[in-house]
Image (cartoon, rainbow, N blue to C red):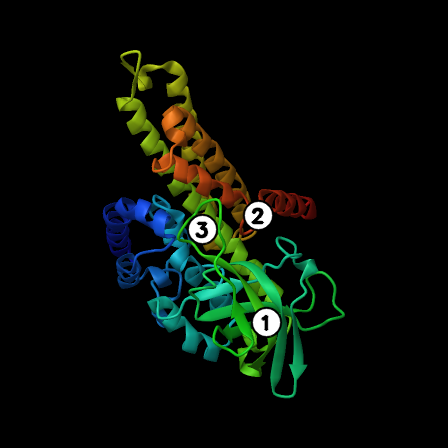
């Protein structure tokens, strides 16, 4: 894609987010659902497949373009991005990077068009950021596998058509060994999807439990056509996903800062706009400075991801810094608004609740610190 085409896509997405999604954020929160008009509009713009290669019907954006798009998507409720985030990110990239040619040709065009929503089913009760406690098993049969177990906090499970399920194919293996990935239709006998969770924030982004009771799948549903591809596929998808989440955090922080500046310019105390108070100015300045640093960090890491220079350490550092930065910016946003910032219906209150999750999913801040430190020590 040339620069002119990409800039046109950014303009269209920016207008759609600000003109169509932002005005309906309250409705999305109240109904805990994305309106069909917004979903269909996103599909028409190609948002279900921006990171899917062009040969399979996607836009084929590289990491820098992905990050710049995420800055725009992050400007509104994060549930909008969640609707198609798994298609482009952690679920779709498993197929892009590790699927067989047959699996890619069958699934990726449907994922890119939005005909199919894919979910990434890795997390379990005892296996979140650390997969060593994974209990879900896939036992080999003569003509395939039988899957038993459960998953938790699975984004878009209730909307999904395709579940990318990670399970142990080697019961004797320890840690990350012996983990494989399977393509499971949600309507397969033995699959049960629980009701979507009630969360602190991010209304409209559904997560649910999954249960597998003697779920039978053919050998052709084994990702990559080989066992033990699963863990490598998961880690590769999560690395790129962490960079994308970092960019979403930048977009979220930009929205909070814009709301805070606007409020500080018009709200008055003692007959003066609060933006004239130096302590309020300091909060705005600190938020802008951290936001600027985060934006440049994401773009730099994305460039190194595209060149192949760094696809592990940088994404973890970006996700760590940006998610923590967002928490601080959200806190200052509420503080600038004062009592109004604690009221439902005020955007910064909603973004404050949503921000808390970014430090947890796709690898907690603590896990990112471990990843960074281990890579530094291994290189010494």
On residue 145, which mark appears? Answer: none
For disc 1, the neighbor class at 10 Å (few under 14, some 14 to 19, many from 20) is many
Q: Which of marks 3 and 1 is nearer the N terminus?
A: 1
Q: Where is residue 38 in the image (x, y as percent from the top left)?
A: 28, 56
Name the residue located 32 percent from the left edge and 18 percent from the top edge.
Answer: 274
The vertical placement of 237 against 111, above or below, is above
Q: Do the residues labelled 3 and 2 touch (CB within 8 Å)?
A: no
Residue located 39% across and 69% down the image: 111
Which label belongs to residue 313? 2
Is there any visible trace of residue 130 in the rendered image?
yes
- Cβ–Cβ below 8 Å for labels 3 and 1? no
Say if 243 sits above or below 219 in the image. Answer: above
Assign a secondary structure to mark 1: strand
- Please name which of the two marks, 3 or 1, marks the residue nearer to the observer: 1
Q: Name the residue under label 3.
A: 244
Q: In which quarter of the image is the N terminus?
A: bottom left
**Is 253 placed left or right of 5 in the picture?**
right
Q: Provide residue 55's location: percent of width, then percent of height.
A: 36, 71
Q: Residue furthest right?
A: 172
Q: How far apart are marks 1 and 2 (CA)?
A: 34 Å
Label 1 belongs to which residue?
Answer: 212
Q: Is residue 233 left or right of residue 135?
A: left
Relative to 105, does residue 318 appear above or below in the rendering? above
The reply to whether discs 1 and 2 touch (Cβ–Cβ < 8 Å) is: no
Secondary element under disc 3, as helix, strand or loop, is helix
Left or right: 269 in relation to 218: left
N-term mark: 1 or 2: 1
Q: Distance between the residues labelled 3 and 1?
A: 30 Å
Q: Quadrant of the C terminus?
A: top right
């Amino acid at each position: 894609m040339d620069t002119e085409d990409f800039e046109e896509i950014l303009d269209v997405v920016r207008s759609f987010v600000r003109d169509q999604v932002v005005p309906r954020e309250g409705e999305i929160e109240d109904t805990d659902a994305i309106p069909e008009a917004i979903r269909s509009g996103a599909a028409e713009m190609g948002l279900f497949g921006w990171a899917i290669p062009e040969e399979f019907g996607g836009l084929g954006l590289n990491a820098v373009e992905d990050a710049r798009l995420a800055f725009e998507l992050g400007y509104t409720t994060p549930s909008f991005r969640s609707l198609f985030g798994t298609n482009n990110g952690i679920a779709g990239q498993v197929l892009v990077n590790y699927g067989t040619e047959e699996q890619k040709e069958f699934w990726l065009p449907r994922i890119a068009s939005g005909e199919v929503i894919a979910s990434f089913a890795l997390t379990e009760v005892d296996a979140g950021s650390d997969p060593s406690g994974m209990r879900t098993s896939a036992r080999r049969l003569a003509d395939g596998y039988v899957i038993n177990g459960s998953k938790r906090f699975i984004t878009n499970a209730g909307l999904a058509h395709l579940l990318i399920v990670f399970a142990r194919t080697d019961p004797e293996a320890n840690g990350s060994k012996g983990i494989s990935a399977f393509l499971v239709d949600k309507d397969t006998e033995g699959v049960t999807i629980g009701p979507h969770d009630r969360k602190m924030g991010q209304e409209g982004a559904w997560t649910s439990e999954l249960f597998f009771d003697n779920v039978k799948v053919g050998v052709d549903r084994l990702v990559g056509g080989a066992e033990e591809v699963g863990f490598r596929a998961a880690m590769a998808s999560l690395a790129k996903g962490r960079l994308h989440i970092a960019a979403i955090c930048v977009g979220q922080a930009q929205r909070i800062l814009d709301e805070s500046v606007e409020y500080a310019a018009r709200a008055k105390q003692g007959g003066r706009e609060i933006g004239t108070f130096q302590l309020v100015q300091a909060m705005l300045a600190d938020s802008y400075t951290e936001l600027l640093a985060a934006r440049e960090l994401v773009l730099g890491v994305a460039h190194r991801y595209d060149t192949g220079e760094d696809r592990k350490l940088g994404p973890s550092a970006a996700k760590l810094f940006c998610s923590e930065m967002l928490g601080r910016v959200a806190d200052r946003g509420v503080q600038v608004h004062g009592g109004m910032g604690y009221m439902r219906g005020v955007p910064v209150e909603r973004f404050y609740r949503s921000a808390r999750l970014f430090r947890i999913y796709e690898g907690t801040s603590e896990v990112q610190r471990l990843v960074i430190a281990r890579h530094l020590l291994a290189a010494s």
